[in-house]
Amino acid sequence: MISMNTVDQIKQPILQEMELFEKKFHKSMASKVALLNRITYYIVNRKGKQMRPMFVFLTAKMVSSEGVNERTYRGASVIELIHTATLVHDDVVDDSNKRRGFFSLNALWKNKIAVLVGDYLLSKGLLLSIDNGDFDLLRIISVAVREMSEGELLQIEKARRLDITEEVYYEIIRQKTATLIAACCSLGAAAVKPEDTDLIERMRKFGELIGMAFQIKDDLFDYTDGPIGKPTGIDIKEQKMTLPLIYTLNTATSKERKWLINSVKNHNTDKKRVREVITFVKEHGGLVYAENKMIAFQQEALALLHDFPTSVYKDSLILMVNYVIARKK
């Protein structure tokens, strides 16, 4: 099983950068309002694996022999500020009380404060770029924020009708999930090699492919045994169209298709029915198909790293790509 040790291993070549980044990131949140400082302190102390800043630093160090610069730190801080803002807003939208095992901001301070804190973090991120003239980095990040919003709305629009094609599904996950990882990798390259547009685009594509694989892996968790030994079926309960289900719907007979759609639309809270859907998807090759697609994205991402000279940073990025599809949660 891949554990936190793998994350530590990935982080190893950039430990100093990550430590300095944490200080700068904390500073970038500072406010004159005591309530805000209390909330941002709470956020900083409940951080996740920090995969996004790791992508920024590993990319920058792999592509440049001169290593990272102040732009790299600012770029990583902006990405993390804006990513945190979207998570805070997501918890409000989803009416979620927990985030990474801790209470969410809206659970502790209510929706109004949570939305305002999200707005504050977003503005701090924008200003950090503008005050330092990092307009190229700001463009990369702003495109990602726009696409994330579009992806979420496209998913909502399509989920109502349960008629998502595989192409539309890829577009949704490209915008919702992959675009932010793509922004981290292109930003890592742009911070240290702003003139090299081919390199920036190549690293953007690399991040996008990892993001696609990452989301498909998330889809598969719905059908595979979770920590309590049973598939979660949460996506089915929420009527989310994931790749295993889309494939199964497209290959089922019209009678089976009607039963599947009816199950997801009208019986998604019936535990027995949800289990039957999970079994049906497994037996009809939905999981195998999605796994193969995930591996194809992973292999395509690895191929983009092939020509870079051997380095500990390249090794860590390869490890990161493999971690994305081998993780257990």
Image: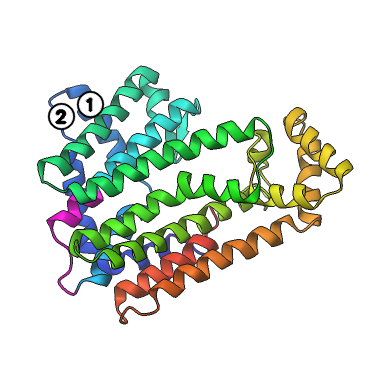
| Residue sitting farthest toward the right | 255
Which residue does the image show at 38% across and 47% down from the upper left? 48
Image spot of residue 146 (x, y percent): 37, 39
Give the residue type that dot 2 points to.
Ser
Q: Which mark is residue 267?
A: none
In three-dimensional space, the C-alpha distance between marks 1 and 2, rounded to whole angstroms, equals 7 Å
Closer to us: 108 or 233: 233
Tell me if label 1 and label 2 are in contact, CB under 8 Å: yes
Mark 2 closeness class: few <14, some 14–19, many ≥20 residues within 10 Å: some
Looking at the image, can residue 214 be seen?
A: yes
* Residue 145: quadrant of the picture: top left
Residue labelled with disc 2: 31
Closer to us: 78 or 223: 78
Give the residue type that dot 1 points to.
Leu
Residue labelled with disc 1: 36
Determine whether, in the image, residue 329 is placed left or right of residue 247.
left
Determine whether, in the image, residue 37 is placed left or right of residue 87.
left
**Mark 2 or mark 1, which is nearer the start of the sequence?**
2
Determine whether, in the image, residue 2 is placed left or right of residue 187.
right
Q: Is residue 72 highlighted in magenta?
A: yes
Q: Is residue 1 above or below residue 20?
A: below
Image spot of residue 27 (x, y percent): 15, 41
Image spot of residue 147 (x, y percent): 41, 42
Which residue does the image show at 30% across and 42% down from the upper left? 142
The stretch of residues the image draws in magenta is: 65-76
